[in-house]
Amino acid sequence: MKGSFPFTAPTWPGGVERRPLERRTGTDYDIAWARRYPARVARALIVDQVLRPVVRVLGSPQLHGLDRLEALEPPAIFAANHKSHLDTPLLLTSLPDRFRHRAVVAAGADYFFPNRVTGAVSALAIGAFPIERRRVSRRSADLAAEFLDDGWSLVIFPEGGRSPDGWGQAFRGGAAYLALRTGLPVVPVHLEGTRRVLKRGAKLPTPATVHVTFGAPLRPGDGDDARSFGSRIEAAVATLADERATDWWTARRRAATGETPSLAGPRTTSWRRTWALDESRRQPAERRWPR
Amino acid sequence: MGRPGFVLEVDRSTPPTLFFHGEGFRLEPLPVGSRVVYPAEPLEPIEDPDDAIRHALLHPLGDREPLPALLFPGMKLTIAFDDISLPLPPMRAPDVRQRVIEAVLDLAAEAAVDDVVLIAALALHRRMHDHELRHALGARVFDAFEPNGLLLQHDAEDPANLVHLGHTDQGEDVEINRRAAESDLLVYVNINLVAMDGGHKSVATGLASYRSLRHHHNVQTMQHSRSFMDQERSELHSSNWRMGRLIAASGVKVFQIETTLNNDTFPKPFAFLQKREWEWSARDRASYFAAAKALDRTPPRIARSLFQTQRAPYGITGVHAGEVEAVHAATTANVYRQQLVPVEGQTDVLTMGLPYICPYNVNSIMNPILVMCLGLGYFFNLYRGKPLVRQGGVLIMSHPTPWEFHPVHHPSYIDFFEQVLSETTDPVEIEAKFEEDFATDPWYVHLYRTSHAYHGVHPFYMWYWGAHALQHLGGVIVVGGDPKAVRRLGFKPASSLRDALEMAEDVVGRDPSITHIHNPPILLADVT
């Protein structure tokens, strides 16, 4: 009869012990299929034909510093600040071709892989793979290193999540650890303006101009450990932020004397932090269309 | 590793040879027995140019300390750089000047140097447009310095900002940019496209005044520079070297950074232009055919804009920094490594196809005076030892030579063409009779200083650049040029290469030896 087995799932006999459920979500989500050729072709189409036009409409991205990547061959680790859901498609669509079509994105397992459908969409559309962001996970690290060894570039947001208030959060050591482990360079990237388009909690996007600034690739030095190299990556992103806010020369001088403004903003009361951020006054959202 | 340049002897199976023809090109069959001098293929570029630049700054040549040791807080630092006339065509971003200047500024920032000024070393060239500066320096440097008034263009007519440093032992005035002269350190960032560039010429010419430049930019000097691409036999260089040494003796500390490029000149769609014709693939032939036919039907104005937007995919082959003369010796060796082609013996008739660009018409129009300068000034002088063409020989060049001028960039050229060349084409007479009037004309000075015009005296220099060739040659024929413009230059027009070769026989006799210089990419004939 239609509507019952075999058209529906069988019921489990009461006298038979149930096998423990195999977890297939979160960090246990299997993404091997998303690296195969058909999925890659589909992703290339999604990234180039869907995400790119959407990002253009929402953010009309201005790219800076691409020349710094000219001598860089894949794979590489792209580490950026994180303020909005727009960051991932923006960064992904801003990467030069040689990186873009073979890139994976480190995505919070709890948010992007809560169930198999969401996980599949994340893995297919943006090449996401799950990482544990609340604690250090060997599985996440091994998976990321495996991708890098395999020639895939990695997009990672070392803050571990979107900014709750518009200011940056402390960088975690994942990108630095992977660079030390694989010997690959880290490209610091600063994204600006994405919060104006789609901030945390917003339901609808507001078109505004966004800026992507690529920094010179960083390689761990002889005495670097994950902590010190992580600090260098954070400082490099802060310098790029300063470069956007002032100019390249001022930013270089402030970086040399250790006066680069912190990404985390002033350490003061919350209203003063918000006041200091004052996004709408400092950088008014340009209404692009209709004028 | 690219193959070296060589001389081909044309036989019955040699395919027709490529001739540039302004914003177009032609395939011309050369008579059997003619020679074609082919340039070397591009040298392998440096894999990591930024690393090479940093290495050069930290390991200078000659009697100079590493750059970081020359930088200190509170100092006055000036960075001068070559202008729009280099390289040709402009190179694909990032320009080598941007790379070098960013590296210098990185070190300056680390040393807490605040007082930094950038100066485009224009000499008497036109002021660069903002978009050209942005391309040469990159957006980061441009946006950091230009809005703050720290990106300047040298003004050779601003007495307040020039300083007279003295006279050389030959009595030559040495007057250069005041800010450069009074800085604690002057860093000069050069692009050495041909052997003429660089060395003491960078500062002594690029940052000099008219009063100083006239000592070597004159007919006498150019006729005794054989050639000005060979520093050992160039009076132009001797004079610049005397001035450079006086500048150093006056206490101006110059940290010279010279860069060399390979000859990878044309972007992909035009890659066939730097291949040897018999190695053209079906795709190359199709590209040639499509491009040549399309350009024939394209209005010249559009063809010009199309070519002027081309960016060369040059690779960087060398970066040397330190004391001027030590650096320039290494740089020149690097230029020779790419460009030198040994050639045995001179020829009766030298043929050449002139391209759409020369140092003075970037984003502009190649007017008839510049055609003369490119052919008789630059291409003729691309030799070491002896000229490719014998004394009394004939030069045949192919270029449309339109009677057309850029009114903003070349205002004094228009008057030079109308007033001076209609009277005489003799450089000595031109210099004696007309130069001073043009050089001191207040309107030309005003346009040079405030607009984007070449200095009033510049067309004279272009003419002097060809003075050695004019003295040496028995005749000059221009194929496919505007007959009126060609005659005004004092040359003979011909409608085809075959006609030109027949006309040349009137001067050099029957069955002359013919040599074609297959340039660009640039080559330097080492004639023995």
Image (tube, grey):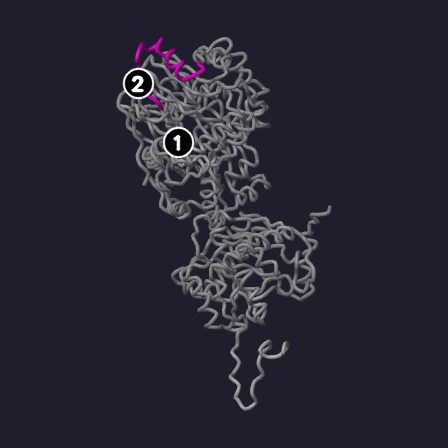
In the image, the segment drawn in magenta is B494-516
In the image, residue B16 lies at what x, y percent? 37, 25
Q: Circle 1 sits on which residue?
A: B521
Give the camera-side residue of A171 and B75: A171
Q: Circle 2 sits on which residue?
A: B347
CA gap, disc 2 and disc 1: 21 Å
One can see residue B175 in this view: no
Q: Residue at left 40%, top 13%? A: B499
Q: Quadrant of the N terminus of chain B?
A: top left
Q: Residue at left 43%, top 65%? A: A145
Task: Say whether residue B506 is magenta.
Answer: yes
Dot 2 falls on a residue whose secondary structure is strand
> Dot 2 falls on which chain?
B
Q: Quadrant of the C terminus of chain B?
A: top left
Earlier sequence position, callout 2 versus callout 1: 2
Please, is residue A21 above or below residue B247 in the view?
below
Whether residues under marks 2 and 1 lie with C-beta atoms below 8 angstroms apart, the answer is no
Check disc 2: other Cα within 10 Å, few if <14, some if 14-19, many if 20+: many
Residues marked 2 and 1, same chain: yes
Three-letter code, disc 2: Thr
Check disc 1: other Cα within 10 Å, few if <14, some if 14-19, many if 20+: many
Is A118 left, or right, of A275 in this rendering?
Answer: left
Give the camera-side residue of B340 and A238: B340
